[in-house]
Image: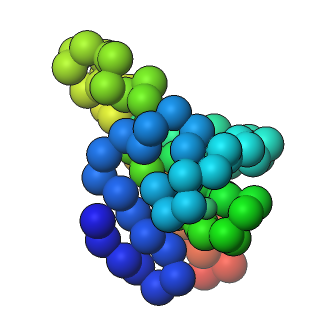
Amino acid sequence: MMKIGEFEIYLKVVDDHKCPHCGDELSRRPRRLWQKAVSFAVPLRHYNCQSCYHRFFAMSPRWKQMKRGERWLRVAATGVVWLAGIYIVFRVLFGVLYAIMS
Ligand SMILES: [Zn+2]
């Protein structure tokens, strides 16, 4: 288990929807779109315990069931999307710079 700031990160799958601190049922928080996008490539899930207010990240159980190839495919797909995004940002930035300089 790692600790980053107030967050604890468990590098294992937590027992299905049970808080590792108090053992209470965890309610899954509704995820925002960007969190879904992140969890597409990163096998971590954000949990929030309503009983002891414990907040932590743990491995997504879905990732354990996935085949190695599918995991790589997801990471690669996310990398491509990120690179494409960066490329577009730079293109726009240089376009603006070019327009200003000339
Ligand atoms: Zn708890």
Q: What residue is shown at x 43% (from left), y 70% (from top)?
A: 8
- State which quarter of the image contains the N terminus: bottom left
Q: Residue 20 or 71: which is nearer the viewer?
A: 20
Residue 59, image x and y in percent?
39, 43
**Coloring basis for residues:** rainbow
Vertical placement of residue 70 versus 28, above or below: above
Vertical placement of residue 101 versus 19, above or below: below
Q: What residue is shown at x 55% (from left), y 44% (from top)?
A: 18
Q: What residue is shown at x 31% (from left), y 46% (from top)?
A: 12
Please say whether residue 27 is visible from this viewpoint.
yes
Q: What residue is shown at x 73% (from left), y 44% (from top)?
A: 27
Q: Residue furthest left?
A: 68
Please say whether residue 79 is visible from this viewpoint.
no
Residue 29, image x and y in percent?
75, 47
- State which quarter of the image contains the C terminus: bottom right
Q: Quadrant of ligand 1?
A: bottom right
